[in-house]
Amino acid sequence: MMSMRSLSPGPLVCVVGARPNYMKMAPLLRAFTARGGLPDVMLVHTGQHYDLAMNERLFSDLQLPAPDLNLEVGSGTHAVQTAEVMRRFEPVVDDVKPSCVIVVGDVNSTLACSLVASKKRIPIAHVEAGLRSFDREMPEEINRLLTDQLADILYTTERDAATNLAREGIDASRVRFVGNVMIDSLLAHKARAVPPETTLARAGFDPNVVSGAAGFGVVTLHRPSNVDSRESFAEAVAVLTDVAQRIPLVWPVHPRARANIDNFGLAATLRGAAITLLDPQGYLEMLGLMAAARIVLTDSGGIQEETTALAVPCLTMRENTERPITVTQGTNTLVGRDRMRVRECVDAILQTGGKRGRIPELWDGRTAERIAADLESWLAEPSTAPERRVA
Ligand code: UD1
């Protein structure tokens, strides 16, 4: 006999852990809630990011509801953080018996929750699947590879992702090209972006930094490969001080980078350059800064995509990217920490405006709706991982 519980489907458990997850999950939550045929939504925050600036401000900017549950795992080594998310997520899954666990992106929380769900035979949907940098020095690459192996349904942002997944033996029937939910957020909130002058003034800086005739550039750096060793970080800072001789820079600094600026004695060099260091900013402040910038220098994944969508030239301070479409179609150029290469690219951008690019296919602001519609029909299929149904 069927139990009562099996008659009412468990919730869609949507997982966020770190900053780049929020702009991906916000449009999904809205689309899931708007679709009558889907189960209720439950938002779980693992607590990987916990700073106010990294967290609550972004939640309110993105109009994300407060999480139903915060697992409060905090920081730790990769093993500790991943294990702690697993330990705390498992009883949640046992308790609420999700119809499906929805994970986004490539952070430690993405993999940890996928591992728990897969051992419990709960269906997993991975949004932003199939991106590969082919660089296993990046912790995110390991998270991407393994999450995609575990996911039952894989939503991709660019067509090449399907080729990556096929190479790893993932059946094409599990893969859906739907576009980019991060761009859903960008298009939904662009009109509310905070002007850069306001952001500077609120932070106690002279707004003229961003309103001069030369314009300004925006910097973000937080990858371990750039900021965790003294040598690499000093090299990156040397690149930035060189660029700052041509155009003033504004840099909202991630806590990891902030700590290492002090640890590695780089503060004095930065103070001597036309570089304004800000605390991590809200989503609307970042949108305003990026949209008005003449150039963005970054090692972030999401910002490579956002600058492509905003048609602002982006120099990515990495040797590779898991988002090649931003280079082939968008405004992105890979420059590493090569000072001469960066100088050439900056000069070209200042003279000609740089790469204009075009908007990649299906980066149209409607990706979350497509995912919600697809998920509804997939969950309704009798063949959807029947052995995975929790009794
Ligand atoms: C994580 C993600 C990365 C993502 C980035 C965006 C992984 C492996 N990495 O990296 O993909 O691009 O988020 O920000 O999941 N810290 C704080 N406050 C916080 C969170 C972190 O001060 O709210 C500091 C702590 O010192 C912590 C360090 O930042 O040890 C790193 O945090 P962690 O979440 O481990 O990785 P991120 O570098 O933020």
Image (cartoon, grey):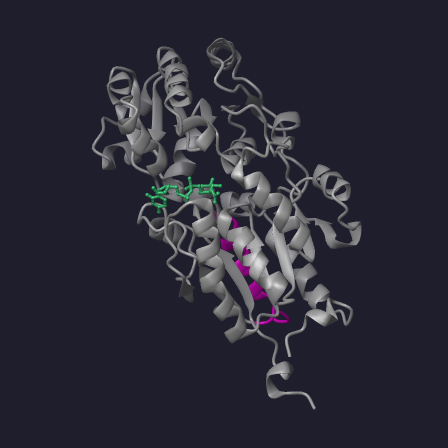
389 versus 283 height, above or below: below
48 versus 319 height, above or below: below
Does the image show residue 364? no
Specify the quarter for ligand 1: top left
Residue lying farthest bottom?
1
Q: Quadrant of residue 358?
A: top right
Q: Nearer the viewer, residue 258 or 275?
A: 258
**Residue 177 coordinates in the image, percent (x, y):** 71, 47
For the record, the magenta segment spans 23-39
Prevailing secondary structure class for the magenta stretch in the rendered image = helix
**Residue 276 coordinates in the image, percent (x, y):** 29, 25
Residue at left 61%, top 30%?
Answer: 326
- Total labels: the figure holds 0
**Residue 289 coordinates in the image, percent (x, y):** 39, 32
**Image quarter hosting the N terminus:** bottom right
**Horizontal arrangement in the rendering, residue 38 relative to residue 246 (left or right):** right
Residue at left 50%, top 48%?
Answer: 108
**Residue 242 coordinates in the image, percent (x, y):** 38, 12
Q: Nearer the viewer, residue 247 or 49?
A: 49
Residue at left 38%, top 49%?
Answer: 49
Q: Is residue 259 magenta?
A: no
Residue at left 59%, top 71%?
Answer: 39
Q: Is residue 32 magenta?
A: yes
